Amino acid sequence: MRLEQNLIYIKDVVLGDVNKVEDGVLTVDVEGLKAAVMVDDKVKDVKVDIAKPGEKVRIVPVKDVIEPRFRKDGRNGFPGVTTKYEETGNGAVNILKGAAIVTIGDMVGFQEGVIDMWGEGARWTPFSETFNIVVDITPIDGLDPHQHEVVVRLAGLRASTFVGLAAENAAIDETKVFEIGTMAEETAKYPDLPKVLYVQMNIAQGLLHDTFFYGVDLKEIIPTWFHPFEELDNAVISGNCVAACDKITTYQHQNNALTYDLYDQHGKTINFIGNIFSPELTTLDGKFRNCDYCAKLCDQLGADGVIVSEEGYGNPDSDLVMICKRLEKRGIKTALVTDECSGWDGTSQPLTDTAAEAVAVVSSGNVSKVIDLEPADKVLGNLKSAQTLAGGWDGCVEEDGSLKVELNAVIGATSEIGYHYASVKLY
């Protein structure tokens, strides 16, 4: 597969009456965006605002973040979801790099999050550095939570697709080309390099905890191999309300940091032979079936080493170490990427499960770390909703508008695919 990413670096965003990019400034057609979202008769109202890096702006409750793009040689959008299915990962796409669609609105579930564009909060979310087009969506009355989630999810994808039209004829600042042949071709080219797979665990639990691949809910499939470029090219979207800190937003799927890092080493230190989805289920039978099948698939594909990343924490910790145990017993070297739920003082057991085979583990941070966030000059959304987020509590919002929350409440703070700002300090 060969994927060409044409990057258009966005230096500022303004609202207007046309979609265009001039000299790095993205102008967004507000009325056109609203019309694109309100094509769904379940959307009652849409508001659009802008939040820029460094501004004292707080966005809450955030549902998803999406990168606007324009597909040059195919259907523009998200195949199997907003457009008919077609394979992604090949061809050319124009990307408004530095811009993001951020969806907010009435609460769907308690596990939505906060983005601060300045100060302490900005240190913990990568989306303090993007120019955010904030789309506030109000669905019609009477929807149940699952219907509400679908309406908001699709509204964000439509908004991103509409804004992405500005990239169609914009001047390209940089082109990056990614190319990997078939497994046989790559193994023939690099016979002496270890074959490495990336197992990506994703929430697939229902109850507002879902991930979609070409529109297919991952809880409906067994572990599946896919080409890494497909995820980088709009095949994967987030549909979950898992804790904000380690929810993998659609933007992060579009820019999976582990996939980029593994590709960077392809042909140098490793032979990167692809990605595998391993759905995180809630049933015991489901966990055994998926973990067994995942290990078998890695073995049959001839992997010498496997990187496993988690999404969420709690019962998915069991899937993580179960996969590790099964891979190591098959002689496959395994490294895990996970965050920790170690309590406010950091002394609690970090994972809910352990295995003696889990000897190579990368921590993306403690979700329970408490941070103090000063008052914002402007709040987009509903500040009081912070009290009902995972990581918030009744009274965490002070009268002056300041917040005291766990990292749990901050979008992307401990992303287990590495797309965040936390780092590890060794003592």
Image (spheres, rainbow, N blue to C red):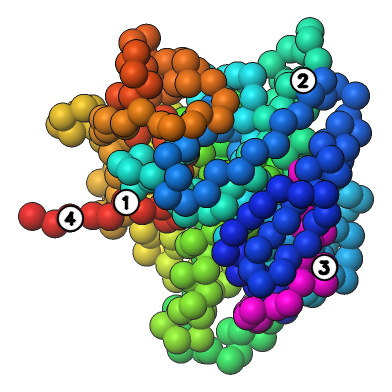
Q: Is residue 109 visible?
A: yes
Q: Please give the label number shown on residue 425.
A: 4
Q: Amino acid at mark 4?
A: Lys
- Is 245 in front, or is 89? 245
Q: Which residue is mark 3?
A: 168
Q: Amino acid at mark 3?
A: Glu
Which sits earlier in the primary sequence, circle 2 or circle 1? 2
Q: Which residues are magenta?
A: 159-180
**Tag 3 secondary structure:** loop
Quote the CA–CA distance across marks 3 and 2.
Answer: 30 Å
Seen at 51% across and 25% down, the residue is: 111
Indicate the position of residue 157 as horizontal and vertical percent values. 75, 43
Under mark 2, the amino acid is Pro
Badge number at residue 139? 2
Mark 1, other Cα within 10 Å: few <14 / some 14–19 / many ≥20: some
Who's the residue at 77% across and 57% down the image?
164
Q: Nearer the viewer, mark 2 or mark 4?
A: 2
> Going from the N terminus, do you reach mark 4 or mark 3 first?
3
Q: Secondary structure at mark 1?
A: loop
Label 2 vs label 1, nearer the camera: 2
Would you call the spot at circle 2 few (<14 residues within 10 Å), some (14-19), or many (20 or more)?
A: many
The picture quadrant where one finds residue 386 is: top left
C-alpha span from label 2 to label 1: 35 Å
Residue identified by numbered label 1:
422
